[in-house]
């Protein structure tokens, strides 16, 4: 894993249970991290620079985003092995994470993460309320 350390996941789940869920396959955690980051990118990538967000390491990472990635990973781990009996807490934390990301995407919440730059162009004039004058000469 690049963004999340296994020891950080073990804060939310016992290491023996994590090993059971992954069947001691750490590559699975890497794949699920990428899946979680892809899901986050799909939800907020239009507005936020997720490439920069996920390139951060250590204490430079946003702790809330880090927690969201971990909760998505754990949800997918449980879903992979027992899709019909995912623990209620895992389902709820996943739904909360997605709900939070949807609020971020809609602009209701503005987290302290890097935003995408909007390049200025003639087409972006409409973002600032510009519209060309209409010719309304009504002659009868």
Image: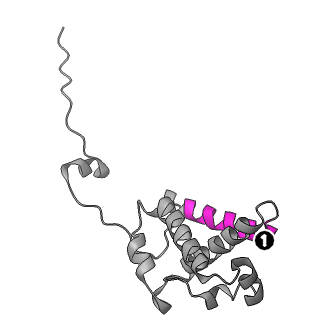
Locate residue 7, reporting x and y percent.
63, 91
- The part of the image, by quadrant, that contains residue 93 is bottom right
**Crowdedness of circle 1 by 10 Å Cα count: few (<14), some, many (20+)?**
few
The chosen color scheme is one colour
Q: Is residue 112 left or right of residue 77?
A: left
Q: Residue at x 58, y 75 (%)?
A: 69
Q: How many marks?
A: 1
Q: Position of residue 139 (x, y in %)?
A: 17, 12
What residue is pinned by disc 1?
89
Task: Report whether residue 107 is seen.
Answer: no
Position of residue 30 relative to residue 124, above or below, is: below
Q: Which residues are magenta?
A: 86-102
Secondary-structure class at tag 1: helix
Pick whichever, 124 or 17, lies toward us. Answer: 17
Q: Left or right? Give the position of 22 relative to 128.
A: right
Q: Quadrant of the C terminus?
A: top left
Check residue 135 for magenta coloring. no
- On screen, residue 127 above or below 82: above
Location of residue 45 in the rendering, given as x and y in whole percent from the top left corner: 43, 63
Residue at 60%, 78% in the rendered image: 29
Left or right? Give the position of 40 relative to 68. Answer: left
- Asked if residue 29 shows in the view, the reply is yes
Q: Tell me which residue sits at (77%, 83%) in the image.
A: 17
Q: Main secondary structure of the magenta part?
A: helix
């Amino acid at each position: 894993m690049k963004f999340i350390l296994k020891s950080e996941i073990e804060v939310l789940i016992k290491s023996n249970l994590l090993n059971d869920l992954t069947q001691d396959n750490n590559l699975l955690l890497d794949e699920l991290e990428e899946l979680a980051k892809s899901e986050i990118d799909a939800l907020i990538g239009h507005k936020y620079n997720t490439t920069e967000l996920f390139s951060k390491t250590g204490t430079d990472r946003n702790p809330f985003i880090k927690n969201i990635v971990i909760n998505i990973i754990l949800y997918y781990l449980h879903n992979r092995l027992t899709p019909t009996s995912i623990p209620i807490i895992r389902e709820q934390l996943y739904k909360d994470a997605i709900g939070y990301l949807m609020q971020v995407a809609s602009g209701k919440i503005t987290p302290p993460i890097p935003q995408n730059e909007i390049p200025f162009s003639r087409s972006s004039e409409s973002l600032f309320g510009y519209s060309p004058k209409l010719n309304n000469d009504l002659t009868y």
